[in-house]
Image (cartoon, grey):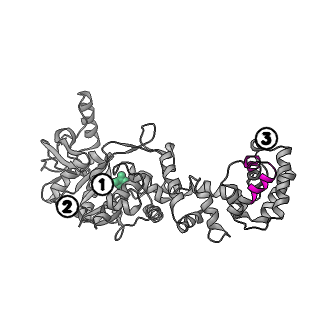
Amino acid sequence: MLTTRFAPSPTGFLHVGGLRTALYNYLYARKMGGKFLLRIEDTDLKRNSQQAVVAIREAFNWCGLDYDGEVTYQSQRFEIYKKYIDELLKNGKAYKCYMSKVELDELRASQEAKKQRPRYDGRYRDFNGTPPAGIEPVIRIKAPNEGKIEFKDGIKGLVSFNCDDILDDFIIARSDGTPTYNFTVVIDDALMGVTHILRGDDHLSNTPKQIVLYEALDFKIPEFFHVAMINGSDGAKLSKRHGATDVMEYKDMGYLPEALLNFLVRLGWSHGDDEIFSLNEMINLFDPHDINKSASTYNLSKLEWLNAHYIKTLPFERLADALEHFDMDFRAMPKGQMLLDMLRARAKTLVELKSSAFIIINEPKNYDEKALKKFVNDESKALCRLYLDALSSYEGAFDASGIESFTMKFLQANNKSLKDIAQNIRIALTGGAVSPGIFEIMEFLGQAQIKTRIANFIKNA
Ligand code: GLU
């Protein structure tokens, strides 16, 4: 069965780059009816892996992703790694190297003096004498020292490494017996049945070493897809200084997971000129062979654009759910759906939406100075006074179109036009000169509240 995995090292939060890797692995597994597994690479026991799993689970939950089966923790698998190391030693594919620190330093120094690449010189590769006393050996794999390691990367095409250039007999277990990174990854991917590995191309140079191990262990080599990095707009690798890196910070900033996933899938993958993809569409359309070869650029305005799109178009219930994180319950609010529909057209984030809701829900405490200067004078206030009187005797339907036609008739009767009063009403109702349509706001607020706000405006502005 096609099996992918996400294999983060625990950091306590999920990085956006990590979420993209997870998403690609998830999409491919779901598309192919396969499995998507989670493995925590926590051999460095100082890091808190439980906290990392909680963070990943929280971010996955928020995004609507899930993984299959139990989480695999590398820290619980030392026995398994040891078994395979012993087996490699037994059949002569790995060996103990007793090189001391002093010897290693001497070797380095002489290589440096000759301007050679620092590398292990294989001195214990065929050693079968008496081991030197007092040295705990490291275990090295017998890597091929000539020829090529080649593999067909699903994104980059044929990738070829010269054994002589890149491979030493690299260490697979340290002198304290703990296995090294490349070794644990190979054992786990093989035993977990991983068939397709999609990961960042910062791992590309590990792959030939891992292939050496697959071959030594007689495991089937999976297919590799090395995904180019996400860069910040300055071309440097994405980091904290380009913006948020923790996925959950995006939630707090008012981004919807629909927008974030859509944004991330497009950072590195495309399907024609399409920009908008629901999770189901991604599952149907995604193919890792279509991932771009070149690095992608993180572009916050694109994310904002997508977020605005989803704020505009998601069903009321879904948006109301997301807004609960910001302590807003549009379902419980009288005319909540109307308010949300009025506001969603212009908000780029849920945080913006919340503040524009506050502006309408609460009576303005003060008025925008610039707006007052530009639009308000004695004449405009006198017209507002007349309008307030007229409103008191209005008995027609109190909905946006009813109020609009009443207002137009009022203006006509007074030889005025909408522009003579619209901004004054807007400032009276919201405190500023930018808002959704004034008649919708009036319908939402109701007759009594409008009168209060216009009266306050006449008195205080
Ligand atoms: N643990 C590695 C990382 O977080 C990923 C290993 C892999 O995908 O092979 O970068």
- According to the picture, the residue beneath numbered tag 3 turns out to be 373
Secondary structure mostly taken by the magenta-highlighted segment of the chain:
helix
Q: Residue at x 53, y 53 (%)?
A: 308
Q: From this viewpoint, is residue 260 visible?
A: yes
Looking at the picture, how far across and down is residue 4, in whole percent?
29, 61
Q: Residues within 10 Å of mark 3 (few under 14, many from 20)?
A: few
Q: Position of residue 145 (x, y in %)?
A: 14, 42
Give me the residue at 65% from left, 72% from top. Answer: 332
Asked if the magenta segment contains residue 413, the reply would be yes
Which span is picked out in magenta?
406-423
Q: Secondary structure at mark 2?
A: helix
Q: Nearer the viewer, residue 206 or 429?
A: 429
Would you place residue 35 above or below residue 202 in this image?
below
Which quadrant of the figure has residue 92? Answer: bottom left
Circle nearer the viewer, 2 or 3: 3
User: Which residue is labeled 2 in the image?
Assistant: 86
Mark 2: which amino acid?
A: Asp
Task: Give the percent coordinates (x, y) of residue 136.
Answer: 26, 52
Q: Does 322 appear above or below 372?
A: below
Res 100 quadrant in image: top left
Q: Amino acid at mark 1?
A: Leu
Crowding at mark 1 (Cα within 10 Å: few <14, some 14-19, many 20+): many
Cα separation, mark 3 vs mark 1, equals 59 Å
**Which part of the image, by quadrant, shows the N terminus?**
bottom left
At 39% from the left edge and 67% from the top edge, which residue is drawn?
66
Residue holding disc 1: 198
- Mark-to-mark CA distance, 1 and 2: 29 Å
